[in-house]
């Protein structure tokens, strides 16, 4: 059966940066060792100095992530859940056959 439909595909820039780390999840920390740690502390001492630790005689900055980090196991799932909530709020419905497709009748 053929339908007369318009189709649009989109790429959402900075998708993961827009997605909060859910509070109910375990905290996610990022370990920033060595040279990058020194650079960050030199640039923003007031912000980072209190979070620098010595790890095997190497300075290391530990960051508690507030947003999901691309490449982590749950980041895609958290972004997908945010996308579903956002897309439904503007009148789209998830496609029954492909949950990564949203449809809207205009």
Image (tube, rainbow, N blue to C red):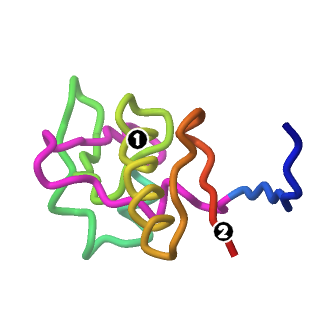
Residue 5 in the image: above or below residue 90? above
Q: Which mark is residue 49?
A: none
Q: Residues within 10 Å of mark 1 (few under 14, many from 20)?
A: some
Query: Residue tagged by mark 2?
Result: 105
Q: Residue at position x 53%, y 39% from top?
A: 96
The first of marks 2 and 1 along the sequence is: 1
| Residue 3 position (above or below residue 58) | below
100 vs 79, left or right, is: right
Residue 103 percent coordinates (x, y): 63, 57
Residue 35 lies in the magenta stretch = yes
Find disc 1 in the rendering and name its residue: 75
Q: Quadrant of residue 69?
A: top left
Q: Secondary structure at mark 1?
A: helix
Magenta part of the protein: which range?
Answer: 12-36
Quarter holding the C terminus is bottom right
Number of numbered markers: 2
């Amino acid at each position: 059966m053929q339908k007369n439909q318009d189709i649009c595909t989109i790429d959402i820039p900075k998708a993961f940066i827009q997605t909060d780390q859910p509070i109910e999840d375990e905290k996610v920390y990022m370990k920033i060792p060595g040279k990058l740690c020194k650079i960050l502390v030199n640039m923003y001492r007031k912000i980072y100095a209190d979070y620098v630790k010595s790890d095997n005689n190497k300075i290391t900055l530990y960051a508690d992530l507030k947003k999901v980090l691309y490449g982590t196991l749950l980041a895609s799932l958290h972004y997908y859940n945010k996308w579903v909530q956002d897309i439904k709020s503007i009148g789209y419905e998830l496609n029954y056959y492909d949950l990564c497709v949203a449809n809207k009748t205009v």
